[in-house]
Image: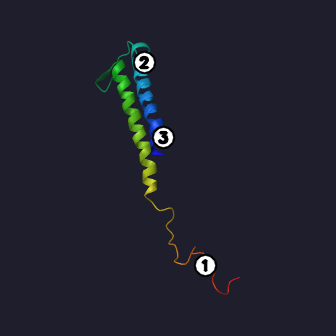
């Protein structure tokens, strides 16, 4: 089963890499062509902007992955579970 999943995901990841390279090149050479601006003394051109946006996307992806992992480490409820709860045996005298 693992090999089947890998057989699908690996080519999809490679396709996403190729598409992202093509998209970055097209954006930098057409839409962002001639764009120059400065923020806090840093000068940004078309390629700097592409890399900055890519870095922000990585940062957002990392932050969005942290939140579910933090919740996974906490117990669902703070109430203690009694020893006889849910053992499936009937108690004598209770009908």
Label 1: which residue?
A: 89
Q: Badge 1 local density, few (<14 within 10 Å), some, or many (20+)? A: few
Name which of mark 2 and mark 1 comes first in the sequence. 2
Label 2: which residue?
A: 27
Please tell me in which quadrant of the rendered image residue 65 appears: top left
Please tell me in which quadrant of the rendered image residue 43 appears: top left
- Compute the Cα span from label 3 to label 2: 35 Å
Name which of mark 3 and mark 1 comes first in the sequence. 3
The quadrant in which the C terminus is found is bottom right
At x 36%, y 32%, the residue is 55
In the image, residue 14 lies at what x, y percent? 41, 29
Q: In what element is the residue under mark 1? A: loop
Residue situated furthest right in the rendering: 95
Name which of mark 3 and mark 2 comes first in the sequence. 3
In the image, residue 38 lies at what x, y percent? 33, 21
- Compute the Cα span from label 2 to label 1: 67 Å
Task: Name the side, left or right, on which 83 lies relative to 95.
Answer: left
């Amino acid at each position: 089963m693992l090999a089947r999943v890998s057989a699908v995901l690996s080519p999809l990841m490679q396709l996403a890499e190729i598409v992202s390279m093509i998209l970055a090149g097209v954006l930098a050479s057409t839409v962002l062509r001639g764009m120059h601006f400065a923020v806090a003394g840093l000068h940004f051109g078309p390629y700097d902007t592409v890399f900055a946006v890519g870095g922000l996307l990585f940062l957002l992806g990392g932050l969005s992955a942290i939140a579910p992992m933090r919740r996974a480490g906490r117990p669902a409820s703070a109430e203690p579970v009694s020893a006889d709860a849910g053992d499936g045996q009937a108690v004598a005298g209770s009908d």
